[in-house]
Amino acid sequence: MAGGITFTAVDSTKLATAEIFGRTIAELGAENPNIVCISPDLATSTKMADFLAKYPERFYNVGIAEQNMIGIAAGMAKSGLIPFASCFSVFASLRALDQVHTDVCYQNVNVKIIGTHGGTSFGQAGSTHHAIEDIGVIRPLVNMTVIVPADGIETANAVKAAAATPGPFYIRINRGFDNVVYSTPDYGFKVGKAVVMNEGTDLTIIACGSCVYQAMQAASMLKHDQGLSIRVLNMHTIKPIDREAVLAAVKETRKIITVEDHTVIGGLGSAVAEVVVEGGKACAFRKLGLQDKWSAIGLHEDLLAMHEIDAEGIVKNVLEVMKMDFEADEDWGDEV
């Protein structure tokens, strides 16, 4: 894997997550001449300008043609290059789906897709630019690894891991300034392994992306105001999901809430629910996200509150789940 990140958590408060991606890919470009970047006329918006400035001969602007971008990236990968193709998440997952499916995943080629402006983070742009289905669309594709980083530092770790790992990757990041979750890159990031952000025994919150910070805030509020012990898992990798962490949460807390800036159909909540059902042990369970509806248009923080995936909304739902009538003994025989 490539070397260390040359910016700090203090720097990350001044940089949008996409800007940290841009700096990271430029650093990786210095270490590996096979890395190339492709953009559908979005170098500025997706923050690939650093790479373009340093390696103009390795940067390709295909124009406003996302399908072509993915097809070209697949061809480059077949030639031994490591292409990073970046555009808005909604277009990478929906408009270019056929090419991602057939050109990238079916051939299992080494293409890294960076979907920016994920979820409702580009809230002002409206429903055409809200990426609320992308995880559910991309997750079923064979050979694809799906990562939703919690902040800028985790984005850098995810990008570095993708560059060092053969095969297709989809990394979904937000448009703007994410709350800082990590103060150092050395917290144990590993593809496919959740990060325990907070230990707890009463209930587990499993979150990804911008909702990780909100979940941590909610856990703190619930401890201070209600005396509740809330486990928080950062499930940054949606595929392959950390089955062990989910099953441990079922056994040890018996109550789970998932939180994501995405529809509740097909995303993180669905992935966790699949593990719970296959594990054969029941638990109280609730999925927070967009409840099978379009989002309003507005600022990201307002939309998080509207969909009850901000700290206050999570607290409200935790208190409701804590009141659910659910057997708390250790005799699983009468539940399976």
Image: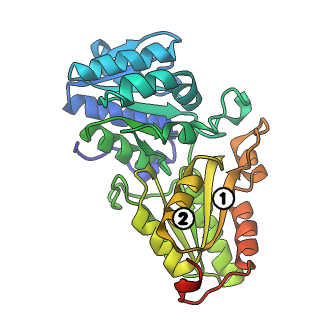
Is 142 or 76 nearer to us in this picture?
Answer: 142
Q: Amino acid at mark 2?
A: Val
Q: Going by the image, does 70 lie left or right of 56?
A: right
* Residue 53: % across, % down: 35, 19
* Residue 249: % across, % down: 50, 73
Q: Going by the image, does 32 lie left or right of 116?
A: left
Give the structural element (helix, strand or loop) at label 2.
helix
Q: Identify the residue at horizontal 44%, vertical 43% (top origin).
A: 146
- Disc 1 versus disc 2: nearer the observer: 2
Mark 1 touches mark 2? (CB < 8 Å): no
Residue assigned mark 1? 287
Give the structural element (helix, strand or loop) at label 1.
strand
* Outermost residue, top side: 63
Disc marking residue 189: none
Residue assigned mark 2? 277
Across the whole image, how many numbered discs are drawn on residues? 2
Q: How is the image coloured?
A: rainbow
* Residue 321: % across, % down: 71, 73
Which mark sits nearer the N-terminus, 1 or 2? 2
Q: CA distance from mark 1 to mark 2?
A: 14 Å
Q: Identify the residue at horizontal 42%, vertical 50% (top origin).
A: 154
Q: Can you tell which quarter of the image residue 322 is in? A: bottom right
Q: Amino acid at mark 1?
A: Lys
The N terminus, quarter of image: top left
Q: Identify the residue at horizontal 70%, vertical 36% (top origin).
A: 123
Q: Within 10 Å of the Cα at label 1, are there few (<14), some (14-19), or many (20+) other Cα atoms?
A: many
Q: Is residue 276 above or below residue 75?
A: below
The C terminus, quarter of image: bottom right
Q: Within 10 Å of the Cα at label 2, are there few (<14), some (14-19), or many (20+) other Cα atoms?
A: few
